[in-house]
């Protein structure tokens, strides 16, 4: 618990860095019409909120005396900061940030629905290891079907199905598009 302000300071800076990465990554998406209707509008808005929350965490940590190197430190390596902290929640937060970034980047390669299915299954298995794998698959498929219904039926935004398009074409002879 003695390292809590230092951990919060590091996580605040990391969250701001992730938000900046997400803003830049989202800004590279195509803008078919007005900017407010572009696919990047929501991620950029949420990333700005994320950066604000990271700033708040960083300011709180600094007000509690958090700094990267302790008093009397001889400037140890930056890597030492998070490798030798013993707080399990801190490491879990770092892993979660990396997991979410990997999901976001994988959408470009796998498309949204296959990436969501894969990451929901993996996320359930990592964060709730006592849940059986077939329950994780059922929850993941239900989640993807729900996302499909929300984006296609409610928002009227048909997203590409990726691998699922080929499966639909193979099974029923056509895709929904």
Image: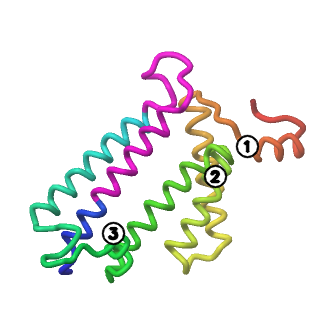
Circle 1/circle 2 CB separation < 8 Å = yes
Q: Indicate the position of residue 70 as horizontal and vertical percent values.
A: 17, 75
Helix, strand or loop at disc 3?
helix
Helix, strand or loop at disc 1?
loop
Q: From the viewer's perspective, is residue 47 above or below residue 39?
A: below
Helix, strand or loop at disc 2?
helix
Relative side of 49 to 110, left or right: left
Q: Residue at x 37, y 46 (%)?
A: 19
Q: Indicate the position of residue 115 as horizontal and vertical percent values.
A: 63, 52
Circle 3/circle 1 CB separation < 8 Å = no
Q: Indicate the position of residue 30 as horizontal and vertical percent values.
A: 56, 26
Q: Nearer the viewer, residue 45 or 113?
A: 45
Q: Nearer the viewer, residue 124 or 11?
A: 11
Give the main secondary structure of the magenta stretch.
Answer: helix
| Quadrant in which residue 11 is drawn | bottom left
The residue indicated by pointer 2 is: 115
The residue indicated by pointer 1 is: 162
| Quadrant in which residue 138 is drawn | bottom right
The residue indicated by pointer 3 is: 78
Q: Indicate the position of residue 45 as horizontal and vertical percent values.
A: 36, 36
Q: Nearer the viewer, residue 23 or 138?
A: 23
């Amino acid at each position: 618990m003695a390292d809590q302000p230092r951990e919060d300071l590091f996580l605040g800076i990391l969250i701001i860095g992730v938000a900046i990465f997400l803003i830049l990554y989202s800004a590279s998406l195509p803008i078919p019409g007005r900017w407010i209707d572009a696919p990047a509008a929501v991620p950029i808005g949420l990333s700005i909120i994320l950066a604000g929350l990271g700033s708040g965490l960083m300011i709180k940590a600094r007000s509690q005396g958090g700094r990267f190197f302790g008093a009397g430190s001889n400037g140890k390596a930056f890597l030492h900061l998070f490798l030798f902290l013993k707080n399990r929640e801190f490491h879990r937060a770092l892993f979660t940030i990396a997991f979410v970034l990997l999901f976001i980047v994988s959408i470009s390669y796998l498309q949204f629905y296959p990436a969501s299915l894969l990451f929901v299954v993996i996320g359930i298995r990592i964060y709730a290891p006592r849940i059986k794998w077939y329950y994780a698959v059922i929850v993941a498929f239900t989640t993807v079907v729900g996302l499909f219904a929300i984006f296609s039926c409610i928002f009227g935004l048909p997203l590409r199905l990726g691998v699922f398009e080929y499966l639909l074409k193979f099974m029923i002879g056509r895709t929904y598009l």
